[in-house]
Image (cartoon, rainbow, N blue to C red):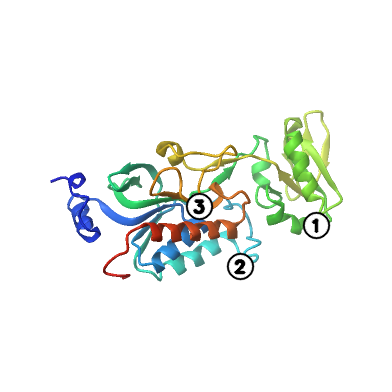
Amino acid sequence: MPPSERTSAPADSRRKIWAEYGMDSYDALVVGGSAAGLSAALILGRSGRRTLVCDDGRPRNAAARAVHGFLTREGVEPHELLRLAREDVARYPSVTVRDVHVASAKPYEEGFVISAGGNAATFGRTLLLAAGMYDDLPQIAGLDRFWGRAAFSCPYCDAWEFRNKRIAVIGEPGRGRELAAVLEQWSDDVWICEESSVARIDGSDVPEIVGYDGSRRTSDAIFVSAPLRLRHPLVDQLGLQVRGDGEIEVDECGRTSIPGCYAAGDAVTTAHQLILASASGIRAAMAINEDLPVRSSGPD
């Protein structure tokens, strides 16, 4: 009898059924292993939920030199924060973390099936999307060389280090002016350069913006007003509702438009900070645990 005809069995029995057909089974599948995903996994582990975290190693802050605004971890390197987070999660035996890319996800019976890393399909009763967003940077030659060390997007993350210094803002007129107005809290020397007028960025230690008109101007830091895009195509694959700003539509607990599917992190928060992404992951994990049936055997 195929698994699809036997999903009314108790959870423990159902896991045995999936195993017979070569399919691992979990209470929760988490796509994305940064602040939101690992925070969710921590709560799910402490709730005794069998959880799989899949991460392809592409956090939005990968190029950053330090994390700011995260209490007790101010100034820590991003990769060190993730290492410490994984250590925390590893205390809970019901949680597994795999360094794999999730290629597809679809609703299946009373849950979801994902395909990850060339392995056999994996079943989960719930699915949490926490793969985040990425900065859709303008195609300006030289910008990538400074990204994370002298070129940024978030003033609350990086402007302090350039207070009272020369700051350039690259962006289209409206968004650029809004960002420049915020940055004036940190410096009186803020100037705006329209994205379409920038030919390239020269320099080695300090960026020099070169315009198509031949102009050159040096700044200690560049802040780019770039739109954010959803990192993972699973949102489209699953047909989730998306807000006007491009982020995933969720309720206050992280539930998406598809029952059993949740979202957390930068893809749902209107303000983008690691500590807020972490908090949204925790809230979604609480909802997952409360929406799932109570295990009669209790936590492992």
Q: Is 130 on the left or on the right of 6, as rendered?
A: right
Counting residues from the N terminus, which is met first, the one under dot 3 or under dot 1?
A: 1
List the residue tagged with mark 2. Answer: 73
Q: What residue type is labelled 2?
A: Arg
Residue 34 in sight from this viewpoint: no
Residue sitting nearer the eye, 236 or 4: 4
The picture quadrant where one finds residue 10 is bottom left
Disc number lying in front (2 or 3) = 3
Local SS, label 3: loop
Residue 163 circle label? 1
Local SS, label 2: loop
Residue 163: x %, y % from top left: 80, 57
Residue 196 in sight from this viewpoint: yes
Q: What residue type is labelled 1?
A: Arg
Local SS, label 1: loop
Residue sitting nearer the eye, 144 or 263: 263
List the residue tagged with mark 3. Answer: 264
Residue 36 circle label? none
Density class for disc 3 (Cα within 10 Å; few <14, some 14-19, many ≥20) is many
Q: Residue at x 62, y 54 (%)?
A: 64
Q: Which residue is drawn at 75% across and 36% down?
A: 174
Residue sitting nearer the eye, 299 or 146: 299
Density class for disc 2 (Cα within 10 Å; few <14, some 14-19, many ≥20) is some
Density class for disc 1 (Cα within 10 Å; few <14, some 14-19, many ≥20) is some
User: In the current view of this chain or complex, which residue is farthest to the top?
Assistant: 213
